[in-house]
Image (cartoon, rainbow, N blue to C red):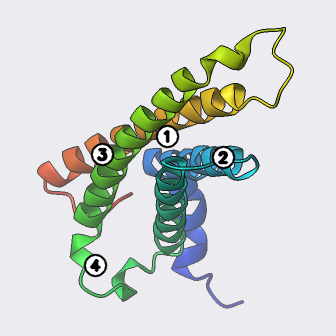
Protein backbone atom coordinates (compact mmCIF):
# COMPACT_ATOMS: atom_id res chain seq x y z
CA UNK A 1 0.00 0.00 0.00
CA UNK A 2 1.53 3.36 -1.00
CA UNK A 3 2.08 5.95 1.74
CA UNK A 4 -0.55 8.64 2.14
CA UNK A 5 0.44 12.09 0.89
CA UNK A 6 1.42 14.71 3.47
CA UNK A 7 -1.49 16.92 2.44
CA UNK A 8 -4.08 14.43 3.72
CA UNK A 9 -2.59 14.49 7.22
CA UNK A 10 -2.53 18.29 7.38
CA UNK A 11 -6.28 18.68 6.68
CA UNK A 12 -7.43 17.80 10.21
CA UNK A 13 -4.43 19.55 11.74
CA UNK A 14 -5.22 22.79 9.95
CA UNK A 15 -8.98 22.60 10.53
CA UNK A 16 -8.45 22.07 14.28
CA UNK A 17 -5.89 24.87 14.60
CA UNK A 18 -6.78 28.36 15.80
CA UNK A 19 -6.21 29.91 12.38
CA UNK A 20 -8.26 27.20 10.65
CA UNK A 21 -11.23 27.80 12.95
CA UNK A 22 -10.87 31.57 12.55
CA UNK A 23 -10.76 31.29 8.74
CA UNK A 24 -13.95 29.22 8.74
CA UNK A 25 -15.61 31.85 10.97
CA UNK A 26 -14.44 34.63 8.64
CA UNK A 27 -15.88 32.81 5.64
CA UNK A 28 -19.21 32.11 7.34
CA UNK A 29 -19.67 35.59 8.84
CA UNK A 30 -18.55 37.31 5.63
CA UNK A 31 -21.01 35.22 3.65
CA UNK A 32 -23.72 36.08 6.16
CA UNK A 33 -23.03 39.78 5.65
CA UNK A 34 -23.09 39.85 1.88
CA UNK A 35 -26.02 37.44 1.59
CA UNK A 36 -28.03 39.59 4.03
CA UNK A 37 -27.36 42.68 1.93
CA UNK A 38 -27.65 41.06 -1.50
CA UNK A 39 -30.97 39.39 -0.70
CA UNK A 40 -32.60 42.78 -0.16
CA UNK A 41 -32.87 46.08 -1.97
CA UNK A 42 -29.80 48.23 -1.42
CA UNK A 43 -28.51 51.56 -2.71
CA UNK A 44 -25.77 54.15 -2.37
CA UNK A 45 -22.97 53.44 0.07
CA UNK A 46 -24.22 49.90 0.67
CA UNK A 47 -22.56 49.02 -2.65
CA UNK A 48 -19.20 49.67 -0.94
CA UNK A 49 -20.17 47.41 1.97
CA UNK A 50 -21.12 44.66 -0.45
CA UNK A 51 -17.86 45.16 -2.38
CA UNK A 52 -15.75 44.84 0.79
CA UNK A 53 -17.71 41.82 2.02
CA UNK A 54 -17.50 39.91 -1.26
CA UNK A 55 -13.85 40.86 -1.91
CA UNK A 56 -12.61 39.68 1.46
CA UNK A 57 -14.88 36.65 1.40
CA UNK A 58 -13.26 35.55 -1.88
CA UNK A 59 -9.72 36.39 -0.70
CA UNK A 60 -10.24 34.58 2.59
CA UNK A 61 -11.67 31.58 0.79
CA UNK A 62 -8.61 31.47 -1.48
CA UNK A 63 -6.22 31.80 1.49
CA UNK A 64 -8.14 29.10 3.34
CA UNK A 65 -8.00 26.66 0.43
CA UNK A 66 -4.32 27.34 -0.29
CA UNK A 67 -3.38 26.82 3.35
CA UNK A 68 -5.64 23.77 3.67
CA UNK A 69 -3.97 22.14 0.67
CA UNK A 70 -0.53 23.34 1.82
CA UNK A 71 0.04 24.99 -1.57
CA UNK A 72 1.05 28.48 -0.37
CA UNK A 73 4.50 27.95 -1.92
CA UNK A 74 2.88 28.15 -5.37
CA UNK A 75 1.74 31.75 -4.82
CA UNK A 76 4.28 34.13 -6.37
CA UNK A 77 5.76 36.99 -4.30
CA UNK A 78 3.54 36.56 -1.19
CA UNK A 79 3.78 32.79 -0.73
CA UNK A 80 6.39 30.55 0.82
CA UNK A 81 8.31 32.19 3.64
CA UNK A 82 6.17 35.33 3.39
CA UNK A 83 2.85 33.50 3.78
CA UNK A 84 2.42 34.29 7.49
CA UNK A 85 3.17 37.97 6.89
CA UNK A 86 0.80 37.98 3.90
CA UNK A 87 -1.95 36.52 6.08
CA UNK A 88 -1.34 39.17 8.75
CA UNK A 89 -1.44 42.00 6.19
CA UNK A 90 -4.62 40.56 4.65
CA UNK A 91 -6.27 40.43 8.07
CA UNK A 92 -5.21 43.97 9.02
CA UNK A 93 -6.53 45.32 5.70
CA UNK A 94 -9.78 43.41 6.15
CA UNK A 95 -10.16 44.73 9.69
CA UNK A 96 -9.65 48.33 8.59
CA UNK A 97 -12.04 48.10 5.66
CA UNK A 98 -14.64 46.26 7.73
CA UNK A 99 -14.45 49.07 10.30
CA UNK A 100 -15.51 51.51 7.59
CA UNK A 101 -18.35 49.17 6.61
CA UNK A 102 -19.48 49.11 10.25
CA UNK A 103 -19.72 52.89 10.18
CA UNK A 104 -21.75 52.83 6.99
CA UNK A 105 -24.08 50.12 8.27
CA UNK A 106 -24.65 51.89 11.60
CA UNK A 107 -25.41 55.14 9.75
CA UNK A 108 -27.88 53.40 7.45
CA UNK A 109 -29.47 51.59 10.40
CA UNK A 110 -29.99 54.84 12.30
CA UNK A 111 -31.27 56.55 9.17
CA UNK A 112 -33.96 53.86 8.79
CA UNK A 113 -34.85 53.56 12.47
CA UNK A 114 -38.09 55.52 11.94
CA UNK A 115 -39.72 52.54 10.27
CA UNK A 116 -39.18 50.22 13.24
CA UNK A 117 -42.64 51.10 14.57
CA UNK A 118 -45.49 48.60 14.63
CA UNK A 119 -47.81 51.03 12.84
CA UNK A 120 -45.39 51.48 9.90
CA UNK A 121 -46.77 49.26 7.13
CA UNK A 122 -44.34 49.90 4.23
CA UNK A 123 -41.25 47.90 3.32
CA UNK A 124 -38.50 48.72 5.81
CA UNK A 125 -34.78 47.92 5.62
CA UNK A 126 -34.11 48.64 9.31
CA UNK A 127 -33.88 44.98 10.36
CA UNK A 128 -31.78 44.11 7.32
CA UNK A 129 -29.32 46.91 8.08
CA UNK A 130 -29.26 45.99 11.76
CA UNK A 131 -28.49 42.36 10.93
CA UNK A 132 -25.80 43.42 8.46
CA UNK A 133 -24.30 45.73 11.12
CA UNK A 134 -24.04 42.82 13.54
CA UNK A 135 -22.45 40.61 10.88
CA UNK A 136 -19.98 43.39 10.00
CA UNK A 137 -19.00 43.87 13.66
CA UNK A 138 -18.51 40.15 14.25
CA UNK A 139 -16.54 39.74 11.04
CA UNK A 140 -14.28 42.70 11.85
CA UNK A 141 -13.66 41.23 15.30
CA UNK A 142 -12.69 37.85 13.91
CA UNK A 143 -10.35 39.47 11.37
CA UNK A 144 -8.81 41.52 14.20
CA UNK A 145 -8.20 38.37 16.29
CA UNK A 146 -6.60 36.72 13.28
CA UNK A 147 -4.40 39.76 12.57
CA UNK A 148 -3.17 39.85 16.17
CA UNK A 149 -2.54 36.09 16.15
CA UNK A 150 -0.60 36.13 12.87
CA UNK A 151 1.38 39.20 13.96
CA UNK A 152 2.33 37.57 17.26
CA UNK A 153 3.47 34.43 15.46
CA UNK A 154 5.52 36.54 13.03
CA UNK A 155 7.10 38.52 15.89
CA UNK A 156 8.15 35.25 17.55
CA UNK A 157 9.99 34.37 14.37
CA UNK A 158 7.66 31.63 13.18
CA UNK A 159 7.24 31.18 9.43
CA UNK A 160 4.17 28.94 9.13
CA UNK A 161 0.52 29.74 9.62
CA UNK A 162 -0.24 26.51 11.49
Residue 120 picture location, percent across and down: 81, 15
Horizontally, residue 108 falls left or right of residue 74, namely right
Q: CA distance from mark 2 to mark 4?
A: 36 Å
Q: Are marks 1 and 3 in contact (CB under 8 Å)?
A: no
Residue 26 picture location, percent across and down: 52, 48
The residue that mark 1 highlights is 139
Query: How busy is the neighbourhood of tag 2: few (under 14 within 10 Å), some, or many (20 plus)?
Result: many
User: Which residue: 49% across, 45% down?
Assistant: 22
How many marks can you see? 4
Camera-near label (2 vs 1) is: 2
Camera-near label (2 vs 4) is: 2
Q: Assign a secondary structure to mark 2.
A: helix
* First-in-chain label (2 vs 4): 2
**Above or below, comparing residue 1 to residue 27 in the picture:** below
User: Which residue: 72% across, 89% down?
Assistant: 1
Horizontally, residue 159 falls left or right of residue 140, namely left
- Residue closest to the eye, 39 or 65: 39
The residue that mark 2 highlights is 37
Residue 50 picture location, percent across and down: 55, 54
* First-in-chain label (4 vs 1): 4
Q: CA distance from mark 4 to mark 1?
A: 27 Å
Q: Assign a secondary structure to mark 3.
A: helix
The residue that mark 3 highlights is 96
Amino acid sequence: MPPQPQVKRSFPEFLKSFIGIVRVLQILLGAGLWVTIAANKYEGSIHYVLFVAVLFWLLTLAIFILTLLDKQDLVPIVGGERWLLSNAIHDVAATLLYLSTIGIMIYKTQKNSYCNLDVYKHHCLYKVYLTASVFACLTAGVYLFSAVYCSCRKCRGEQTVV
